[in-house]
Image: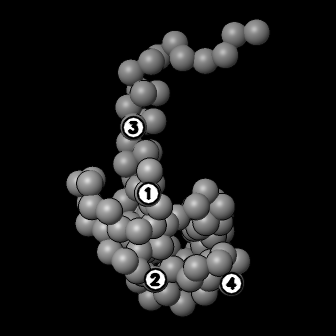
């Protein structure tokens, strides 16, 4: 197996040489920063974060805590990833009305 960061193009997506992979620590840190930003009132009236707020508040804090700094395009990619996984879990929970833990 080759190094996953070498840019082999066997999958559906585009891979470039300067692509920075998201680790779980990076993803968790972004999620915490997004929750903090929304709780502090940085979101718009429709509940979304503007590009200016993301670039001014979230990305500098994220870059200070992780190894490879992320750009707004990296943020958009991870936001798309969050949405995809949220939709899967939401569908699972919606279709399983008796889902829960039983002691």
How far across and how far down the image is residue 94, in percent?
41, 26
The alpha-carbon separation of the residues under discs 3 and 2 comes to: 26 Å
Q: What secondary structure is found at the residue carrying circle 3?
A: helix
Q: What secondary structure is found at the residue carrying circle 2?
A: loop
- Asked whether 28 or 87 is in front, the reply is 28
Q: Which residue is mark 2?
A: 71
Q: Which residue is mark 3?
A: 88
Mark 3 surroundings: few (<14), some (14-19) or many (≥20) residues within 10 A: few
* First reached walking from the N terminus: tag 1 or tag 4: 1
The alpha-carbon separation of the residues under discs 1 and 4 comes to: 30 Å
Q: Which residue is mark 1?
A: 2
* First reached walking from the N terminus: tag 1 or tag 3: 1
* First reached walking from the N terminus: tag 2 or tag 4: 4
* First reached walking from the N terminus: tag 3 or tag 2: 2
The alpha-carbon separation of the residues under discs 4 and 3 comes to: 31 Å
Q: Residue at x 58, y 61 (%)?
A: 23
Mark 2 surroundings: few (<14), some (14-19) or many (≥20) residues within 10 A: some
Residue furthest toward the front?
Answer: 1
Quadrant of the image occupied by residue 14: bottom left
* First reached walking from the N terminus: tag 4 or tag 3: 4
Q: What secondary structure is found at the residue carrying circle 1?
A: loop
CB under 8 Å between discs 1 and 4: no
User: Which labelled disc corresponds to residue 41?
Assistant: none
CB under 8 Å between discs 3 and 2: no
Q: Residue at x 49, y 87 (%)?
A: 55
Mark 4 surroundings: few (<14), some (14-19) or many (≥20) residues within 10 A: few
- Asked whether 41 or 70 is in front, the reply is 70
Quadrant of the image occupied by residue 2: bottom left
């Amino acid at each position: 197996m080759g190094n996953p960061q070498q840019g082999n193009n066997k999958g559906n997506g585009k891979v470039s040489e300067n692509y920075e992979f998201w680790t779980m620590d990076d993803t968790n840190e972004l999620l915490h920063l997004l929750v903090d930003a929304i709780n502090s009132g940085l979101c718009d009236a429709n509940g979304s974060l503007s590009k200016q707020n993301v670039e001014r508040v979230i990305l500098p804090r994220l870059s200070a805590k992780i190894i490879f700094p992320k750009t707004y395009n990296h943020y958009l990619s991870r936001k798309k990833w969050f949405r995809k996984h949220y939709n899967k879990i939401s569908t699972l929970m919606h279709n399983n009305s008796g889902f829960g833990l039983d002691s």
